[in-house]
Amino acid sequence: MAALAATSLLCHPAEAAELELTLRYDRPASVWTEALPIGNGRIGAMVFGGTSEERVQINESTLWGGVPHDYINPDAGSHLADLRQLIFAGKPADAAALAERVMGRPKLLMPYQPFCDLRMHFPATAQPESYHRELRLDEAVATTTYVLDGVEFRREVFASYQDQVLVVRLTASQPKRLTLDVAIDSPQEGTHVETTGSDRLLLKGQIQPRHNPPSTWTGSWDEPGLRFAAVVRVMHDGGTVRAANGRLQVADASAVTILFSNATSFRNYRDIDGDAVTTASGYVDRAGERSFDELRRRHVDDFSSLFSRVQLQLGDTASTETTDRRIKTFAETDDPALLALYFHFGRYLLISSSRPGGQPANLQGIWNEELRPPWGSKWTTNINLEMNYWLADAGNLWDTQEPLWSLIRDLRVTGADTARAHYGAKGWVLHHNTDLWRAATPVDGPWGLWPMGSLWLANQMWDHYEFSQDREFLAHEAYPAMKGAAEFALDLLVTAPSGTRAAGRLVTNPSTSPENNYLVDGKGQSLSYAATMDLQLVAELFERCRKAAAVLDVDAAFAERLADAGSRLPPLQVGARGQLQEWIEDYAEAEPAHRHVSHLYALYPGQGIDVERTPALAAAARRSLELRGDGGTGWAAAWRVALWARLRDSERAYTNLRFLITKSTLPNMFDLHPPFQIDGNLGATAGITELLVQSTVDEIRLLPALPKRWTSGRMAGVRVRGGATVDLSWRGGELTETRLRSERATHYRLTYNGRSANVALAAGVPVVLDSALKMIGR
């Protein structure tokens, strides 16, 4: 796949040369949100680029608070009938009070933790000149250069997936000019650092018991948890290195390579008896057998093989201005190349934070310096985790999804236990958050009684099947998860009693629309039945399960049961303001501009609402978006980009992109919720893709919502449902060329600007079409 994308780009070398793939700065980072992120899916690091003092703040994907824990509340199931009765009786406040008795134990989950800091101290002799700091996205290398006393110093930092080490390379333009101290420390209590031999540091520790105030939305634990270790090795050309006072002192070297790796005792969510010291030491020992040049080549080859699959160019000119200044002036410049860089940065972040064998990208990807990070830096499953992976399928980064599929495998186990204990149900359930210990219970408070997480993730697995056409994945990963989520949904559904708006229909109860409230007698309430998002998730999952069963030729009787239940769901409703209702009743909203737009799931990322197939519902969805307003938090604006793209409204989509850059982007391009959350970065990349290409398994929409400011550009390597890959270019706001290819024989209906064409693809044979959708060369 990567080779095909590269071949296509070779046809346009001038255009390919214009791609902007570098973040640039002219001063060191003064705070964490100015540092540059690198990662290999397991090790995450933030590089500050200091001259007298360099700090590389480091994480490891499995270092979390707490210990293996079963969150199930054995008393929860005994309250379910009463809870449902209160909700049907229109007593949401009483239901919320009772809901506190069905929360998981404890009801606050565990936090992702910072690991350590690698520090380098350089003797200061003068003020540095010609300072430059950059991050090359295509190579995943952070570089710092400056001149001091007539000597140019260069520092490269990268995190290798191939060798599982972080590498720091220091060079100077004159020999024997590198003198520095290397140290390591950790914000975790009780850590110990020792020197081992003349060229190594060893940090060891164990997560200690901690009490976190409930106001931090972070759980507490009262026993020691994961053990962890980090190893630093210094290799040098010329000069000397010696151990002293817990540091490594390098003097008069011509080049220095620092190898770092870390590990925890985590084996799985039930076993934390691994040997962190041996694991971390092994990574460093094996990497030390390779030269720096080989380590760098292996890293760059690996990373670029993923990153190069999709490329985007917007506009005809590149910029040499620093990235932070471009962000500051974007409101005046509307710099299209900066948005292309932002698109590529999202792809960079997903590759860096989610690789096979590791954990999925969490609320902060893999980067966190705080002992009590915002919302625990958990996996929030009522939008944020799903949003992190929206770009993976169209963005041709299928490899990055393996940690998500692995998480789902675990959650199918803990979720099945929770379904039985809390609901007396079959299948598996997931509520709105989970952590390293695979919590599946309702947590935080009554608003956490949202049992739809398993359905959303199962639907996302079907999306991957539609893009990949991978029958093995469908049979062994997706369909078992989908069927289990559907089994839970069948048992969750109950018949609404007479006197209710949905009387006689099958409805979810308890139900809520994630994190939003409606007003009853002037007071905000969250619990209801048959929230609109629930109905959309259930209907979509039932339909997709039936399709999957047909593809696999299994479970015919189960498919019929799903069809029957689906026919009994309440229809989506349009409220008095012309909006798609968020709740079963047309309630007033406690926050009319709320960040979540959960009731628009069927528009995006779902496919139940479409401008052409369901115009009335699409119009109601549009009205809901108008009423909710643009912007909001970073990730909320990113979601709105994709929603407006599905409505073919390029300018409203662009308004939200502008908001993202001008209001919700930090100097290092991280998304600002606020505070920092990675979902806005990753979700915006998916939204930009939707502006340029949309698809079903048999239709491709070309430039369906091209912003007017993007007068010229090209995209290469984007994947579409049905398994094909699309390249396209445009100039003067008009499509100029489209190139399709597929690894399997298939066919599509292509549409662009009122025109359409039917195209048949033979396996491995590219097809090129002109601006009129006529095939070139035939």
Image (tube, rainbow, N blue to C red):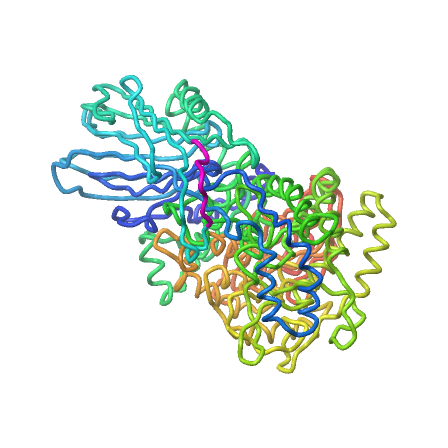
Q: Which residue is the extreme one toward the bottom?
A: 576
Q: Residue at x 61, y 50 (%)?
A: 73
Residue 344 at what x, y percent from top left?
A: 47, 49
Q: Which residue is the extreme one toward the left?
A: 125
Considering only vertical position in the picture, is 126 above or below 169? Answer: below
Residue nearest the observer in this picture, 635 or 450:
450
> Can residue 508 be seen here?
yes
Q: Residue at x 21, y 19 (%)?
A: 240
Considering only vertical position in the picture, is 772 above or below 203? Answer: below
On the rendered structure, is 289 left or right of 464? Answer: left
Q: How many marks?
A: 0
Residue 212 at what x, y percent from top left?
A: 41, 50
Considering only vertical position in the picture, is 216 above or below 237? Answer: below
Q: Quadrant of the N terminus?
A: top right
> Can residue 760 be seen here?
no
Q: Residue at x 41, y 37 (%)?
A: 207
Residue nearest the observer in this picture, 265 or 523:
523
- In the rendered structure, does residue 18 fall within the stretch colored magenta? no
- In the rendered structure, does residue 224 fall within the stretch colored magenta? yes
Name the main secondary structure of what is drawn in magenta.
loop
Residue range in magenta is 219-227
Residue nearest the observer in this picture, 27 or 217:
217
Residue 538 at what x, y percent from top left?
A: 72, 59
Residue nearest the observer in this picture, 687 or 241:
241
Q: Residue at x 42, y 39 (%)?
A: 44
Residue 409 at what x, y percent from top left?
A: 65, 40
On the rendered structure, is 331 left or right of 751? Answer: left
